[in-house]
Amino acid sequence: MAISVIADIIGSRALPDRGAAQRTLEDVIARVDHDLPLAREALRPTVGDELQGVYARLDDALAALLLLRLALPDGLECRFGVGVGSIRTVPSEGGAIPDGPGWWAAREAVELVHAKQQRQAPAARTWVVAAADEDAATHARVPLANAYLLARDHLVGAMTERTRRLVYGRCLGRTQRELADAEGITQSAVSQALAAAGAAAIVEGYDAILAEVPA
């Protein structure tokens, strides 16, 4: 079993500079992979506005995608489909082609989160689907993960770009004083911004995910 992730850039056709946005996204992905090196295969562009990556565990993927969301600047957003299931590659003259139930589940997940974003959950950006042949325990975990992601995405979606930077720093264990110095603001301003955004819940959730990741 693997965790397949399909990401697509939201509103890519309307971006004023598509090339610059792609470079920024790839820089952010590299930063997250440096700060939290959990990807088995880091997110990489495939075709159009889509990227694909692979993680060993669901917890790894959820933690990394949180940091990615927090690190993206205003005006550049992605939605993420997370598939739980086996994957394989199909030989081809043009190179190996990713395939298998995990990728099919990730495709379904990104389509589901897109639909939810347009209707009942506008802030939704991340969704998990387990392949049909996964065991009952895996399928039982998926609704819990999605409930967590809906709440997490709602909080992150309401944050300013600066607040997201602050939360990113807190997830990595940086002190409020360190963050204040980096932003050129007071520690009190950092504390107020974090409290107003509900950042403590995001950081606690992040820590809880990583607590289950083997050292």
Image (cartoon, rainbow, N blue to C red):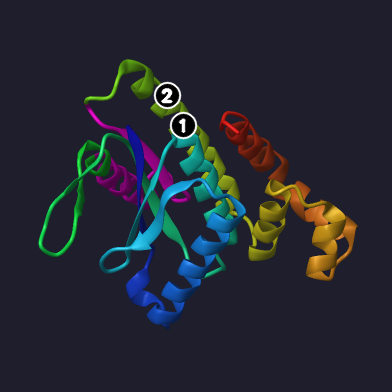
Residue 85, above or below 29: above
- What residue sits 37% from the left and 61% below the top? 44
Residue 140, above or below 206: above
Few, some or many residues within 10 Å of mark 2 (<14, 14–19, 20+): few
Quarter of the image where one finds residue 11: bottom left
Q: Does the magenta run of residues contain 207?
A: no
Residue 162 x, y percent position in the rendering: 69, 64
| Image label count | 2
- Whether label 2 touches label 1, CB < 8 Å: yes
Q: Would residue 152 appear left or right of 48 to someone viewing this image?
A: right
Q: Is residue 5 left or right of residue 91?
A: right
Q: Tell me residue 108's x, y (percent).
A: 25, 43
Task: Give the residue number, with chain letter if any, for mark 1.
Answer: 145
Image location (x, y in percent) of residue 84: 33, 35
Residue 141's mark?
Answer: 2
Q: Is residue 43 left or right of residue 60?
A: left
Highlighted range, magenta: 105-132
Residue at image coords 52%, 48%: 64
SS of the residue under disc 1: helix
- Residue lying furthest left in this view? 93
Secondary structure category for the residue under label 2: helix
- Cα gap from disc 2 to disc 1, whole angstroms: 6 Å
Residue in the image at 18% along x and 54% along y = 97
Residue drawn at x 50%, y 73% as measured from the top left: 24
Which quadrant would the C terminus be assigned to in this image? top right
Most foreground residue, 70 or 188: 70
Q: Amino acid at mark 1?
A: Ala
